């Protein structure tokens, strides 16, 4: 029986327009929680602790940041009081960001936590975990790197180990992304839906303490993106994202390649990608996968996303599929290893 993890990366945008906590985080999370409550299933929210730490540090000097911090905490409290869970996500460029004249200026040259020195890495990750555990009143058991930048893992391995975090969920099979600030290459990772590792999640190690729970990937074709463009024109309102920000600008060639060649990307409820969810699950079932991990961003979700999410959940419940959390995996798989 396949087990499903509905995961959501709770964060703002990282481009010139980061968006607001209200529209990127609070409002879409409320809609998600309402659907989850209706079907009595858990969601897993990977919370960007980098942004939360930046707010905590600067809010005493800016009234507007105090409001953002309070609204973010309100959102996390709502998650904690539901059947859902909070886990660690981290975009560390917020840590050394500047807030001036009502605007954030991010240092995207520090996109990866590995770009900080050893003492800074330990302090940032430890403070992040402490903050999230205080808010959620639950133990953090899983990590997802911002921008999937989990490598080089050895630079954070012992920090996570000291904090008793042994699950990573940053990798997705076949993924290959290169930008001005970071790059990932998951083309040669094990084609499995769960495996142990030690020094790198790109290589299975049967004796490894850590466990990789990969995000399920799906091969998107150029035809998929052509359909998206057409649907966006026909269903503009339904496919408009909730978030009021924009991502880091991508070079024209990086956008064009989607229409030239098929590529792997996480299964998601973001915008039109939600249309591929059913087909992706059918492939996972055919491959006899035990886990199906969906990665979505509330800021990138839309009315269409919510509609597809509810249809998907209702269909899975009808087929008696289970919706689980990383805590379930931790209890059932890692208990004997730690």
Image: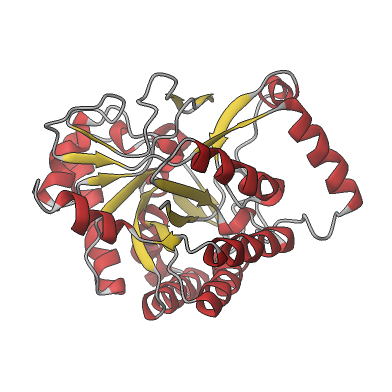
Res 199 quadrant in image: top left
In this picture, is 141 found above or below 212?
A: below
Left or right? Give the position of 234 relative to 71. Answer: right
The residue located at (36%, 56%) in the rendering is 49
Residue 3: % across, % down = 41, 54
Looking at the picture, tell me which residue is in the foreground, 200 or 111: 200
Looking at the picture, tell me which residue is in the foreground, 45 or 221: 221
Left or right? Give the position of 160 relative to 303. Answer: left
Give the colour scheme shown.
Answer: secondary structure
Left or right? Give the position of 176 relative to 124. Answer: right
In this picture, is 139 found above or below 34?
A: above
The residue located at (70%, 56%) in the rendering is 241
Residue 218: % across, % down = 57, 35
The residue located at (72%, 47%) in the rendering is 272
Res 53 quadrant in image: bottom left
The residue located at (39%, 63%) in the rendering is 58
Residue 51: % across, % down = 42, 56
Looking at this view, name the residue that lies furthest to the right: 234
Query: How many circles with numbers are drawn on the protein?
Result: 0
Residue 269: % across, % down = 61, 52
In this picture, is 104 found above or below 138?
A: above
Let me know if residue 111 appears in the view: no
Res 46 quadrant in image: bottom left
In this picture, is 55 found above or below 63?
A: above
Looking at the picture, tell me which residue is in the foreground, 17 or 295: 295
Let me know if residue 89 appears in the view: yes
Looking at the picture, tell me which residue is in the foreground, 183 or 200: 200
């Amino acid at each position: 029986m396949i087990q499903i993890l509905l995961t959501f990366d709770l964060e703002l945008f990282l481009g010139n327009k980061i968006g607001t906590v209200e529209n990127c985080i609070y409002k879409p999370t409320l809609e998600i929680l309402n659907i989850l409550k209706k079907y009595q299933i858990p969601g897993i929210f990977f919370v960007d602790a980098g942004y939360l730490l930046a707010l905590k540090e600067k809010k005493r000097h800016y009234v507007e940041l105090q409001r953002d911090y309070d609204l973010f905490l309100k959102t996390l409290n709502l998650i904690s009081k539901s059947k859902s869970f909070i886990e660690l996500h981290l975009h560390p460029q917020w840590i050394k960001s500047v807030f001036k004249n009502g605007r954030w200026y991010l240092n995207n040259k520090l996109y990866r936590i590995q770009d900080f020195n050893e003492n800074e890495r330990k302090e940032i990750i430890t403070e992040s975990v402490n903050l999230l555990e205080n808010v959620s009143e639950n133990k953090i058991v899983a990590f997802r790197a911002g921008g999937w930048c989990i490598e080089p893992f050895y630079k954070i391995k012992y920090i996570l180990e000291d904090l008793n975090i042994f699950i990573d969920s940053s990798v997705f099979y076949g993924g290959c992304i290169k930008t001005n600030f970071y790059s990932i290459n998951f083309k040669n990772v094990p084609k499995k839906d769960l495996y142990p590792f030690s020094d790198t999640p790109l290589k299975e190690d049967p004796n490894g303490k850590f466990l990789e729970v990969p995000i399920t990937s799906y091969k998107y074709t150029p035809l998929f993106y052509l359909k998206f463009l057409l649907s966006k024109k026909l269903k503009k309102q339904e496919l408009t994202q909730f978030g009021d920000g924009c991502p880091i600008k991508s070079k024209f060639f990086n956008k064009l390649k989607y229409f030239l060649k098929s590529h792997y990307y996480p299964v998601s409820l973001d915008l039109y990608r939600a249309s591929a969810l059913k087909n992706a699950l059918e492939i996972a079932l055919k491959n006899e996968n035990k886990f199906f991990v969906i990665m979505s961003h509330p800021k990138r979700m839309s009315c269409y996303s919510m509609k597809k999410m509810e249809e998907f959940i209702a269909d899975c419940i009808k087929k008696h599929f289970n919706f689980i959390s990383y805590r379930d995996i931790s209890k059932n798989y890692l208990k004997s290893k730690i």
